[in-house]
Image (tube, rainbow, N blue to C red):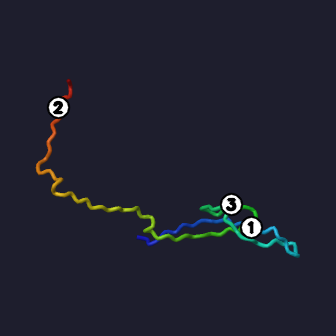
Amino acid sequence: MDTHKDAEFYVQIEPEFSNYVNRDGERSLRGIKAVGITQKRPVKPRRGVVIAKLTLRIPSAAFLPLRPEAIVVVPQSMVATSPIEVEAGDATL
């Protein structure tokens, strides 16, 4: 069994510029943000973005379903010593 699974995807990363303009007329880069995530490389990326291919490696055990276990103890006082029999009959009045 594989110990991990990989998920590959593409992220479009857009720059966020500040409103401040320096002496050369350039704005400073304030930050970046992810503006699109796709399974395949985007055919028409947004203007001015950087495309990054990322791979997430997740342990396979993270995807196993929960397997709860319980032990139910039935005390002797609640056990019928003889079977209970029920006979079906006609319920007409």
Mark 3 or mark 1, earlier in chain: 1
The kind of residue on which mark 1 rests is Glu
State the image coordinates of residue 35 (x, y, percent, origin top left): 68, 62
Q: How far apart, in angstroms, are the residues tagged by discs 3 and 1? A: 23 Å
Q: Which amino acid, mark 3?
A: Val
Tell me the element at label 2.
loop
* Secondary structure at numbered mark 1: strand
Label 3 belongs to which residue? 43
- Which is nearer the eye, 26 or 81? 81
Quarter of image, res 73: bottom left
Near-viewer residue (77 or 20) = 77
Total numbered labels placed on residues in the image: 3
Rendered location of residue 91, percent (x, y)? 20, 28
Residue 86: image location, x then y, percent: 16, 39
Residue 89, disc: 2
Question: Picture coordinates of residue 11 (x, y %)?
Answer: 64, 65
Q: Nearer the viewer, mark 3 or mark 2?
A: 2
| Quarter occupied by residue 9 | bottom right
Q: Earlier in the sequence, mark 3 or mark 2?
A: 3
Inspect the image, locate mark 2, and give the three-letter code of the amino acid beneath it.
Answer: Gly
Q: Residue at x 81, y 67 (%)?
A: 19
Evaluate if marks 3 and 2 touch, with contact meaning CB atoms under 8 Å apart: no
Image quarter of residue 17: bottom right
Q: Quadrant of the C terminus?
A: top left
Marks 3 and 1: which is nearer the front?
A: 1
**View extreme (left): residue:** 82
Mark 3 vs mark 2, CA separation in Å: 73 Å
Q: Is residue 33 left or right of residue 25?
A: left
